[in-house]
Every structure is written in C-alpha cells, then in structure tokens.
Amino acid sequence: MKNTLTSIFALVLGFITVTFAAVIGLFVGLGALIARPFIKKKINAAYEEALKQQGYGQMHQQAQSGSTIDGEYEDITQSAPHGSKQSLA
C-alpha cells in the first residue's frame, strides 16, 4: 500500500514538473519570437554605425544600391553546353 501511494505521488509530481517545464518553455519561445525583430534592428543599426565610424559607410551604401562595376561580362544563363546532359542526382 505504501509503495502504491508513493508511486502515485511520484507520477503526479512528475506530471506537474513536466507541465511546468512545458509552460516555461512556451513563454521563453514566445518571448524570443517577440524580441527577434527588435534585436535584428539593433544589430543592423550597430553594424551601420561601426561602418560609418570606420569610414566604410559610403562604400557600403553603394554596394547595396545595385551598381555594377565596369569589366568583363560572362553570360551564365547557358551554364551547360548544348550536347551535355547533367544529372540532378
């Protein structure tokens, strides 16, 4: 009888512990999802500020504007010769 009561108490305590851990994990995950955009915004702002302080601010903005550099151009739209067959494996 004593062993039965002890095992039932242990099962109930284990269930409560697992439920508590699941609820805490859910809150931590939800907090991470909410905080992610704010953290990315702060990291990008700090990165831009660091580039500006090092004198790369102007160069970094040009690289992202989509400007091209004059030079040789190689067409890569036809990457495989007409006679060869490439396997997708």
Image: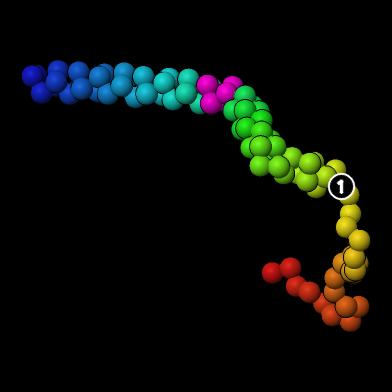
The colour scheme used to paint the residues is rainbow
Can residue 14 be spotted in the picture? yes
Q: How many marks?
A: 1
Taking the image as shown, residue 49 lies to the left or right of residue 59, namely left
- The correct choice, above or below, for 58 with respect to 40 in the image is below
Q: What residue is disc 1 on?
A: 66
Specify whether 9 is left or right of 65: left
- Quarter of the view holding residue 72: bottom right
The quarter of the picture where residue 73 lies is bottom right
Q: Amino acid at mark 1?
A: Gly
Q: Nearer the viewer, residue 62 or 26?
A: 62
Where's residue 77, x and y in %?
A: 89, 65
**On the rendered structure, is 55 left or right of 67?**
left
Q: Residue at x 69, y 69 (%)?
A: 89
Q: Indicate the position of residue 23 as horizontal and vertical percent values.
A: 43, 20
Q: Residues within 10 Å of mark 1 (few under 14, many from 20)?
A: few
Q: Is residue 67 left or right of residue 13?
A: right
State the residue lying farthest toward the bottom: 83
Q: Residue at x 88, y 57 (%)?
A: 69
Q: Position of residue 1 (x, y in %)?
A: 9, 19
Asked if the magenta segment contains residue 2, the reply would be no
Q: Nearer the viewer, residue 37 or 60?
A: 60
Point 86% across, 47% down: residue: 66
Q: Tell me which segment is drawn in magenta.
A: 31-35
Q: Quadrant of residue 88?
A: bottom right
Picture layout, residue 88 above or below residue 10: below
Judging depth in this view, the residue of 57 and 13 nearest the camera is 57
Q: Secondary structure at mark 1?
A: loop
Can residue 44 be seen at all in this image of the molecule?
Answer: no
Asked whether residue 33 is drawn in magenta, I would say yes
Q: Is 23 in front, or is 16?
A: 23
Secondary structure mostly seen in magenta is helix
